[in-house]
Image: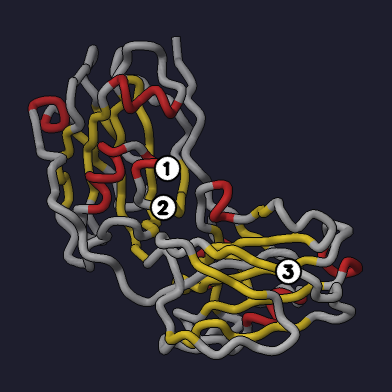
Amino acid sequence: MRRSFPALIAIAVVAGAALTGCTGNSIAASAACDVKSGSGSESIRATGAFGKDPEARVPSPLNVTKAQSTTLIQGHGKKVGDDGVAEVYLTLFDGATGQIGAETSENFVPVTSKALGAGLAGAIGCAQVGSRLAVVIPPKQAAMFSAPEGSSIAAIVDVKSAFPNRATGRARPATPGFPTVVLAPNGQPGIVIGSHAAPTKVQSAVLRQGDGAVATKKDALVVQTQIVGWSDQTSATGTWENGSATVQTLSDGSALAQELLGRRIGSQIIVLTPAAKSGSGDATATVVDILGSIPAASIQQQ
């Protein structure tokens, strides 16, 4: 009988004035790669085109006490690194049965233990873009994906691209009239609205000036976002809160798309949106980190 696990954070194509995010243009160096190849990961076979549904053979039962990772296809791109964001094509398998346990999907995943567990994060963080990995995750880490109790999870991971998890542009002086933004050590923004009046029109300012390519309507931006509303200034939403990066198209005519057009990759932007245009019924302040870009046409094909 097929067992179903929740899929990892799926790619989201977003539109609307309320969304914002963070960006950067360099990948942090990876820490020591301690997720090694082992008999479990070496027993997995996978064929098929890179970035597509793999034809995989996962022997069962397959169980490990420590995460293992074997490179099935060696990529030649940049190393993903710790704390970055990786675009992956990922399929999970039940180690007890060898059967697929979640729908294969495109994902933009933060390469952190909190989001992926130490084993999967370690394997992806040490991979080069263009690589296909066979990873086996022990039960204590597989539990975060709602695997059956005591079961390991096997994963086929195609690493398609990699981005930093935050804006890496040069800090700019604060713009008068805009809320204060402070950054946690991991780059997550905190937005302090204070006594600022709610905006009556869409406004934006550059917090960090990137030096990457200029975003055009042909681009879809990979972003991190942090959003705070005027009515409840203590609650935040966005990708920093839900654990995923996401994608913003720039050709949909939304207020957010208009504010991000012409910005450089690596920039961090704050966007103020009045209640009438936010989509939430409340005026919002959104910090957007632009991590990178992918062709908008590639989103339409998914």
Residue 193 got which mark? 3
Does the rendering let one see residue 97?
Answer: no
Identify residue for label 2. Answer: 110
Above or below: residue 267 compared with residue 76: below
Q: Residue at x 51, y 44 (%)?
A: 9
Mark sitting earlier along the chain (1/3): 1
Query: In the visual, does 180 lie left or right of 29?
Result: right
Q: Image quadrant of residue 255?
A: bottom right
Say what amino acid the circle numbered 1 marks. Answer: Ala
What's the residue at 30%, 45% (across, down)? Answer: 121
List x then y, in percent, for residue 266: 45, 79
Q: Residue, x 39% and y 22% (percent of image)?
A: 143
Q: Are marks 2 and 1 in contact (CB under 8 Å)?
A: yes
Total residue callouts: 3
Distance from the alpha carbon under mark 1 to that under mark 3: 29 Å
Amino acid, disc 2? Pro
Q: Considering the numbered disc 3 on the image, is that residue within a helix, a strand or a loop?
A: loop
Q: Which numbered mark, 3 or 2, is in the foreground of this view? A: 3
Please tell me in which quadrant of the rendered image residue 160 appears.
bottom left
Horizontal and vertical percent position of residue 169: 43, 83
Which disc number belongs to residue 115? Answer: 1
Relative horizontal placement of residue 68, taking residue 252 as reference (left or right): left
